[in-house]
Image (cartoon, coloured by chain):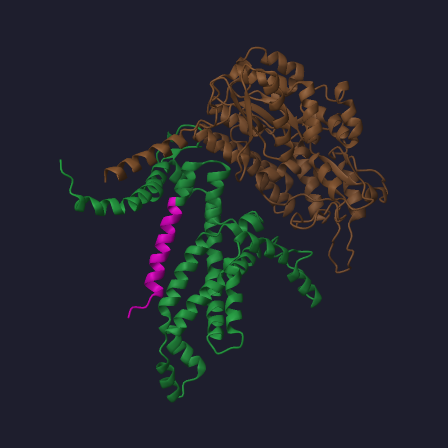
Chain colours: A green, B brown
């Protein structure tokens, strides 16, 4: 049989990607879905248990707690991230001395390892020897249990995560701000618009796509909260910092409940998908 | 095109060939032995395998430390899945054995000729019963232990009214009160009598609740016949004792482990720890710093020996071993009294054997290492863990109630222990379904 080289060549060229996709994406996804109907601890054979993992999921109070914690984290982290990043981007968009230095300095935490940043902040948040409490005591205020008080711990983690990631969003906002045509501001100046009016009536609407992207990126990033509570608080105090991803990890790799972890993972992925769709509907403004 | 095709086929063949590697057991009779990957144990394993290979021609033993990973347990699990487990593994945590045994990946050692006689010569019958699996077989050789005891700063303790380490809860609490200080006058305590990790991670309870529970109860079990058996006065007393320590700020709620060693810096006077602390303390202690070890504190009314957690690490033979008899033959020579002396000399870890204190062979070592002698005396009264495939979950459930009650005081000790026992019973019920 004669092989038509021209017909086969395109398939050969895309075959590495198809192979990669099948092996590392399609197969794990399909396998995870199959796993949700099984009990499996890796070392023993898989046992079909029907929808028991799903029933367990809807009765799991710790998972519910972890979902609420994740939402609390997002509720603090996303607005804080946008406000701080937008403010700093606005400042850095002006003609400043040492502009390059400041831009690099704000971006630096993004490229530092998450573990290193977490350990650094753990020292800052220390109750007895931490920098923050030393400052509070020096100005006559009481110490705060940044990581030991169940009501405060998640906020501390959100602040730290914002500090770590804000540099990336500053860059995105800077790009957004630089795409706003200057003649809009010139026209507004002629009309006598104030600085605030220009910001709310021109800048914000014009950088809406950037805001949408930042919201989506920080939502997905926030949903995958893991390293910070894992290292800083070990998901305590009183489960107040256990995130959904951390709980899934715990089920999968502490206790090897692979079927249940896959169920939690699938459910969580659907939640993220739904949230992104809702955000797209509410945040993104049509032209 | 044909050349490309044959190249792809060759590459696939190579990948399959690599993934089919059976862990390096090339000759049918030869053995592969994985040790722990700390430098002392690597040294020990290298020495013992070299001696064997020099004196025996029948089969060879090649050793390698367990490959690097987040934990040796994860590596073993990956090896089990890939069927690349070694023939012998010598650092198996006792609590993991039951799950592996139930999965059928370990050789039942009691089926090997001479194993039970050897075991009874080495250990007390209580140890044999402790390591017996739920199916009645024995899958592990008790090898080494690191008992948890109370380390104390002699200089600090001698300055307190009792002038010796505390024996019971009352003494511990009264010395804690006496020692607690606010040295910089900012209104906050900065010197505590002791410290235990407040993290809820299940294994942290090996260094506070569990050894104290064993000490109070005379080595009682946590679970038996798929039921929680710790809803008793011992667990409640331990929770009450520890709750007092946190409530009165005698123990810090803050994680002090991220700082400079707080024990060597005299920020705390005591800690619950194992013999591994000796090498660390001797290497890093400041000039004039003296320390020693004492048994775990017990309730005031306690009578009898004081047990503790022994953190046992045992030896297993995996079912991928083609010749378990050879593996057993090698192990018999590795853990003789002479082999155990080598273990002590090289690793400073205690072999789990009943004649540790009486056997003259070890006398020289203990005279040279008097602090290890304290651990050797304690070794008669250590417990490992109960046989259960869900032991980590059991400790996790206890740990969650521990955090709620002991560290944050949101539950009474009675309620917390009751809730933990209920949760463990529910866990067993769910597992049975």
- From where the camera sits, is residue B121 visible? yes
Residue B114 spot, x, y in % from top left: 59, 11
Which residue occupies the foreground of this view, A115 or A195? A115
Which residue occupies 44% across, 32% down? A42
The image shows residue B378 at horizontal and vertical percentages of: 73, 27
Task: Determine if the magenta segment contains residue A285.
Answer: yes
Rendered position, A25 above or below B318:
below
Q: Quadrant of residue A47?
A: top left
* Residue B290 relative to residue A143: left or right: right
Q: Is residue B296 above or below residue B247?
A: above
On the picture, is B363 further left or further right than A88?
A: right
- State the image coordinates of residue A214 (x, y, percent, origin top left): 41, 63
Q: Nearer the viewer, residue A28 or B252?
A: A28
Q: Is residue A249 left or right of residue B181?
A: left
Compared with residue A275, is residue A39 higher up or lower down, i.e. above or below? Answer: above
The question of residue B343 being in magenta is answered with no
What is the span of residues highlighted in magenta in the rendered image?
A266-287
Report the predominant secondary structure element of the magenta stretch: helix
């Amino acid at each position: 049989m004669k092989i038509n080289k021209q017909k086969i060549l395109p398939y050969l060229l895309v075959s590495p990607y198809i192979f990669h996709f099948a092996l590392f994406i399609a197969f794990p996804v399909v396998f995870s879905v199959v796993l949700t109907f099984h009990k499996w601890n890796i070392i023993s054979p898989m046992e079909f248990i029907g929808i028991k993992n799903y029933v367990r999921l809807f009765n799991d109070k710790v998972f519910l707690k972890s979902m609420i914690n994740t939402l609390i984290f997002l509720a603090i982290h996303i607005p804080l991230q946008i406000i701080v990043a937008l403010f700093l981007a606005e400042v850095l968009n002006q003609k400043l001395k040492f502009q390059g230095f400041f831009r690099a300095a704000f971006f630096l935490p993004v490229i530092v390892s998450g573990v290193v940043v977490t350990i650094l902040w753990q020292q800052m948040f220390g109750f007895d020897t931490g920098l923050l409490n030393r400052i509070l005591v020096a100005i006559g205020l009481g110490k705060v249990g940044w990581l030991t008080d169940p009501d405060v711990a998640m906020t501390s983690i959100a602040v730290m995560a914002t500090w770590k990631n804000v540099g990336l969003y500053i860059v995105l906002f800077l790009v957004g701000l630089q795409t706003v045509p200057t003649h809009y501001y010139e026209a507004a100046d002629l009309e006598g618009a104030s600085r605030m009016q220009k910001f709310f009536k021109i800048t914000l609407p014009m950088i809406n796509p950037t805001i949408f992207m930042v919201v989506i990126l920080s939502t997905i990033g926030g949903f995958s909260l893991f390293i910070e509570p894992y290292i800083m608080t070990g998901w305590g105090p009183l489960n107040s910092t256990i995130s959904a991803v951390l709980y899934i990890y715990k089920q999968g790799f502490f206790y090897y409940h692979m079927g249940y972890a896959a169920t939690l993972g699938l459910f969580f992925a659907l939640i993220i998908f739904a949230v992104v769709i809702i955000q797209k509907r509410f945040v993104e403004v049509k032209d | 095109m044909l050349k490309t095709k044959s190249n792809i086929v060759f590459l696939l063949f190579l990948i399959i060939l690599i993934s089919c590697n059976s862990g390096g057991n090339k000759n049918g009779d030869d053995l592969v032995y994985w040790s722990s990957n700390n430098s002392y144990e690597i040294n020990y394993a290298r020495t013992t395998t070299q001696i064997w290979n020099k004196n025996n021609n029948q089969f060879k033993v090649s050793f390698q430390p367990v490959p690097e990973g987040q934990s040796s347990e994860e590596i073993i699990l990956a090896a089990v899945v890939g069927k690349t487990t070694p023939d012998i593994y010598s650092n198996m945590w006792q609590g993991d054995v039951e799950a592996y045994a139930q999965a059928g990946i370990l050789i039942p050692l009691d089926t090997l000729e001479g194993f039970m006689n050897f075991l009874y010569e080495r250990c007390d019958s209580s140890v044999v019963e402790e390591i017996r699996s739920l199916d009645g077989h024995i899958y592990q050789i008790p090898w080494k232990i690191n008992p948890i005891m109370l380390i104390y700063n002699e200089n600090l303790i001698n300055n307190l009214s009792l002038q010796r380490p505390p024996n019971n809860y009352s003494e511990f609490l009264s010395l804690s009160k006496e020692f607690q200080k606010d040295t910089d006058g900012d209104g906050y305590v900065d010197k505590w009598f002791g410290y235990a990790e407040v993290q809820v991670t299940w294994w942290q309870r090996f260094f506070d609740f569990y050894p104290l529970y064993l000490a109070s109860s005379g080595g009682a079990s946590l679970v038996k016949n798929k039921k929680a058996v710790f809803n008793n006065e011992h667990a409640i007393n331990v929770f009450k004792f520890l709750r007092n320590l946190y409530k009165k700020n005698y123990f810090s709620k803050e994680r002090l482990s991220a700082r400079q060693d707080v024990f060597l810096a005299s920020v705390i006077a005591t800690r619950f720890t194992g013999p591994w602390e000796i090498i660390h303390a001797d290497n890093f202690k400041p000039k004039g710093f003296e320390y020693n070890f004492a048994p775990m504190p017990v309730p005031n009314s306690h009578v009898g020996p004081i047990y503790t957690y022994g953190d046992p690490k045992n030896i297993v033979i995996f079912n991928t071993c083609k010749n378990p008899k050879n593996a057993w033959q090698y192990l018999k020579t590795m853990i003789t009294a002479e082999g155990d002396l080598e273990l002590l000399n090289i690793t400073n870890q205690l072999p789990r054997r009943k004649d540790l204190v009486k056997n003259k062979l070890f006398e020289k070592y203990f005279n040279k290492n008097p602090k290890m002698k304290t651990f050797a005396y304690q070794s008669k009264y250590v417990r490992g863990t109960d046989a259960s495939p869900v032991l980590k979950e059991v400790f996790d459930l206890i740990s969650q109630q521990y955090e709620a009650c002991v560290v944050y005081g949101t539950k009474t000790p009675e309620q917390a222990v009751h809730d933990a026992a209920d949760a463990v019973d529910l866990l067993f019920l769910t597992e049975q379904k």
